[in-house]
Image: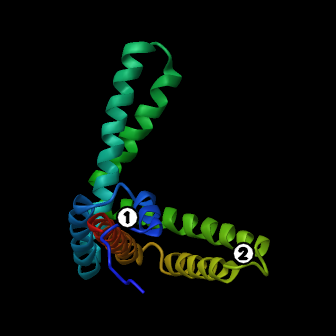
Amino acid sequence: MNTTVTNQPTPEILKKAKAIPNFGTFSILIGILLLLLGAMGIVLPEIMSLEVSILIASLFVVGGIFWGSHSFKYSRHQWSEWLKPFLLLVSGGLMLFYPMSGVAAIGLLLAIYLLLDSFASFTLAYGLYNERGWGWMAFNGITSLFLAVLFLAGWPASSLLLVGLYVAISLFFDGSVLIYLGWIQKKLASN
């Protein structure tokens, strides 16, 4: 019986390598940066909350400027075309000048999102009842509902802590996943 080892990749390895072709060394680098940013946000969630509020406010202001320039160029005489840039500029400006209120608004929006996510997860779990994975979907719904209640129970005061933690934990896990996928792709490519 000949048991020689070849360096030829098996069909399973080739299939896995094709499944995640867009990950590699750059993914590992970005993953490390996201993981570090998430870790800093977990340690300093209040600062992360303020950063998120300022980032969203800045995007609103920039979007309002772009939309306003579009309205000026193509329909400057229609007042309805100026409503959207006006709202973007005003809401972005208010969030920049009052970032704590912006954090509270983001906290409320996250609570609403988590409530909708829990409803969707429960609905999907009910549709998958007695199928493989339905329990995980129900667990996801319970987790989202718990987080929504946590946001709403102390709102608006808890938003400063919870928004930063929510974003930081998300960045931490996104970074972890990118590192893992980049490492797997590098390993598969070397085989």
Q: Quadrant location of the N terminus?
A: bottom left
Color encoding of the figure: rainbow
Secondary element under disc 1, as helix, strand or loop, is: helix
Does 144 sit left or right of 3 as displayed?
A: right
Q: Is mark 1 in CB contact (under 8 Å) with mark 2?
A: no
The answer to whether residue 98 is visible is no
Q: Which residue is mark 2?
A: 125
Judged by depth in the image, the label closer to the viewer, 1 or 2, is: 2
Total residue callouts = 2
**Residue 114 x, y percent position in the rendering:** 56, 69
**Residue 59 x, y percent position in the rendering:** 33, 45
Q: Quadrant of residue 40 in the image?
A: bottom left
Q: Quadrant of residue 170 in the image?
A: bottom left
Q: Which residue is mark 1?
A: 103
Q: Quadrant location of the C terminus?
A: bottom left
Q: Is residue 80 above or below residue 31?
A: above
- Residue type at mark 2 is Ala
**Residue 20 x, y percent position in the rendering:** 41, 60
Q: Quadrant of residue 2 in the image?
A: bottom left
Q: Is residue 135 above or below residue 9?
A: below
Residue at x 33%, y 50% (from the top left corner) = 57
